[in-house]
Image (cartoon, grey):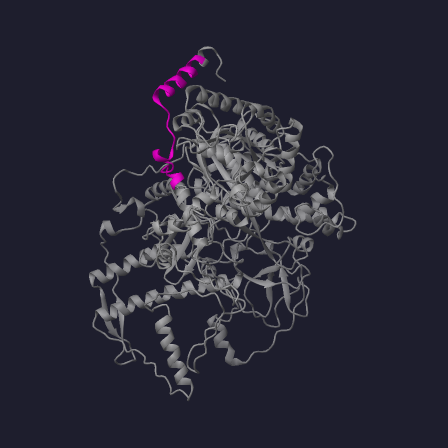
Amino acid sequence: MLPRPARLVRQNVITGCRKRHFTSTFVVRASSTQGQVVGQAPSPTLDDSFHDLIKEGDMGMGMGPKRSLKSTSKGKGKMTIPDLELVDDSHPSSSKSQHKFGLIVEDLDELDSSKYDEEEVGEFDFSRREERRSPATVLGSKRVGVVVLPDHLKNGIQRQIDQLDNPRTLRQSYLSLPSSSSRRSREEKVDHRSSRPRKTVEGELAKAAGILPGEYGVVRNVFEELERRLGKGWLDRSTTAEKKEIVEYSGGLGSGSWATIDAFLESSTSDNLKIQLVHSSRHSLDLAQKIMEDVSEQAADVHFNRKHVPSDHRPAVVLSTFLLSTLPTQPSQQTHLNQLLSLKSPYIVLIDKSTPTGWQAISRARSYLLDQSNSDDPLHVLAPCPHDGICPLVSTEDKCSFSQRIQRPSFVRKTKHSNRGEEDTGYCYVVIARGERPISNLPDEPTFRGMPKSSLGRLGGVGKEELARSRLKQDGRSVLREIEGHEGILEVVNLPEQEHVNEHDRVELDAEDKQKMQNGLREEAYSWPRLVAPPMKRSGHVTMDACCPDGNIQRLTYSKSHSKQGYHDARKSSWGDIFPHTPKATPVVRTRGVRRLNKTQNDDEVLNELLAASAEERSDNDSATLKELESLGIKLPKAEVIEEADLEGESSSSDSFRKSYQTEGPFSKSGQKRGFSNMTMTPSRHTVQITRSSNPLQTRSMSARPPPRPKVTLSTLRKLSKSDTPITVLTAYDYPTALLSESCGVDMTLVGDSLSQVCLGHDSTTQITLEEIIHHAKAVTRGSKTPFVFADLPFGSFEVSLEEGVRNVIKLIKESGVDGVKIEGGVEIIPLVRKLSEIGIPVMPHLGLQPQRATSLSGYLVQGRTAQSAYEIYQTASEMKDAGAFGLLLEAIPHNVAKKITDDLDIITIGIGAGNGTNGQVLVITDVLGTYSQEDIVGDDAKESTLVETPNQLQQASELTLPTPKKPSASPRFVRQFGSIGMASKYAINQYVQAVKDRSFPDTKESYNMKKDEWDGFLTLLEEAKVNNQSP
């Protein structure tokens, strides 16, 4: 039997039940307080043979007095009706007018529960099925079913819609909302001060009709979770003030205020509840106040303000509902968060939409609020995170979002032009609580009441049944008995349990222990993993991706062998739950993204999944019975499958199919293989046809494509340098080499002027022009999407004047799309570096050996080997830092000088021939790949070469070093691949990146040294400069 979903309905319920008299009229629940009377049809005359059936009381048309019947009204709503009642023609109906269909609508207020005794009411079974989930799983469940809007909210919105001259304009106003996915048919009005869409009365009413119901359901779900996690009366315990105040900063129409009124309407807090709704829009506040006219002052004391009005006591809860994503800048969001912190509330609830903007606002707010935590005022995350560390989904395309379903009123369906009776609203949220993160305070001993602490609250109906079954089997209290009337057929009968049960086997707890267990579970719940995606439920196991307390996304698997209770709870889990059971299998840390469903699950698939789970439970019980029979020595007959003779031509195909299945199937020696094409196998008449449907059911891949790496920015580079993580830099000159940097995870890509020699065949780097650099940089930026791409400023493009240098740099950046520039030079380029930094262009000066000035340096020689030259490089680097350079490229200088610059100056350093003491390393890609490492061998030199002497040896060397070429499936017919250069290139670059990361490159043999006396003289010059205040 499928469990009925718990619905949040705050309406009057039937206080009494009419005993079934089997009349021919319907008793229909009224939709309002006044009963609507309709006529009665003459009752038909029944045959005498039906009297016995009528007396048995089994002619009702439902399982209880409450059922759903579609109304014939225009709104297509649902009315709740009791069972049929059959009356005779003399049924008194003087007080009710008659209807030709025999329907009588009675007023619920006229039902007197006193005239129905307990025996009559006892005929109906109102009790729900006993909860089979464990108490811990129930505590961690986030699912609340379908949320139904309260009557005063629906009536308030409908009343405002009825006051419109033309209600059809509401649809046009809804389409004109900025958040609407439909195209706007007219230009929206914009506020000239904030440059944001101006709010109008029509637009706010459209939000109330189309958006407010979904936002209400979201906040209602969050309040339900807080009540489960914190316990009933948590609002009373949050503050000592007699008047419990809840402050809501709303970006909508006060969905948090409506959810607060509905959540605490029947609690003891409702008498002393104060709600302050803060909204910057005058139209929004006026409309919210008009909608709340039906709410009595006894239910809540609601205040409407455009700015927060402080009170004498701190508020119990501070809400920010759907507001953060509407704030345009990050400083404005931080100002809003500081305002929330200043209220000193014990709970801060932030809710926003599940859009990329909303998730970004929530994730930033979470990080910012946790950064404000200190020893005097600690903060921790109550929900949804099981930890206070960095969110593992921030650097991915996935969002930590959830969904809540609501029942659509008629005005929502009309506004959205949809006939669906329900809708799902996605949201992101975070609840910040003050204080240290709670930990379990259960006893330190490993057991409590005879049970391990980890199993407290993990035993539900399924576990109790399993314990009872195992206890009966262990005690041998089961017998075989012949079924009466069926000779030779036996059945297993379990004897009743003994009156005296071992105290250790007793699983029931008294009231005090139950309360203690609940308190312990609530504290343990802070470390339970949270499901961040819908679980994948398969026969025999359940797989789920969850955010775990260690700060990682882990894949957890629960199988039948784990425990029947844990497996049952996993089958009943849903997206957003916190799951208490520990998996038996080793969790797998997810570093490649979170698995998601391909499409939204519809109701039929959910029903099929629940039916499959129920059938699986029944099969478990049947298998347990069969095992008991086999243990008693009873062998059950098994059915034989006999295949008919195949027709000619079919048997051979069937045999070939079986042979191919045995050799290539999932149980073959080669293992299971995954295909990518649709395939239909119809080998014979008696073979099952395997066809991939054009509209398949939901499929989920057990692996996820790695998420795209975020773009490397200056902030990323600074974080790498601060964390002492080496930065990898590689040159690229065209699209293929740029793709190598992209695919291998290189941090920075340099379009260097070395392309003049390695790509264009020039003798030096001074011969390349700015237009050639721009041409190659365009191709590089198309391939390197995530690395930080910067280009060399060629010789002759910046030496003439400062204005020409700035003009050429701007041209280079605009036309090529690079992120920054590199400039070779000394103190003479400091004004250019300062000017470019002032206008926001990242600049990296090139110090040490400068290839553009190799002639003036007497060739490609190591620089900075003397004390004076090393001091000049150090001083120039310091001045470049002061001018605004974001980094320095140090080439061919002693490793101890480069390390001294890196340690003393707060600037990123990239070295090439400068040792491994810098923040990163750069190499020319042709040097990494060894493109020109094989020199041309001519004449007698070829015979003396030790590398390759003959063509046969060349072939053998290639076979040893290069993998076997494989032709790509997408290649044309005429292509034959003779090598695997791409694979070898990726391997080489990956080796380079790994060597830089683990600081094995460069080693001491690949670095330049400095004489000890020169090094001492360099340090002396630095000390003298500090004494004379000459050091920058």
Q: Which one is in front, 269 or 507?
A: 507
Q: Which one is in front, 23 or 303?
A: 303
Q: Residue at x 51, y 71 (%)?
A: 59
The quadrant holding residue 538 is bottom left
Residue segment shown in magenta: 995-1024
Q: Is residue 76 magenta?
A: no
Residue 167 x, y percent position in the rendering: 75, 51
Q: Is residue 1022 magenta?
A: yes
Residue furthest toward the right?
165
Q: Residue at x 41, y 43 (%)?
A: 992
The quadrant holding residue 468 is bottom left
Quarter of the image where the N terminus is located = bottom left
Q: Is residue 434 visible?
A: no
> Is residue 806 positioned above or below 429 on the image?
above
Q: Residue at x 36, y 58 (%)?
A: 959
> Is residue 956 positioned above or below 549 on the image?
below
Residue 447 x, y percent position in the rendering: 26, 43
> Is residue 260 positioned above or below 831 on the image?
below
Residue furthest toward the top?
1028
> In the figure, is residue 956 to the left or right of 236?
left
Residue 26 x, y percent position in the rendering: 60, 66
Q: Which one is in front, 586 or 622?
A: 586
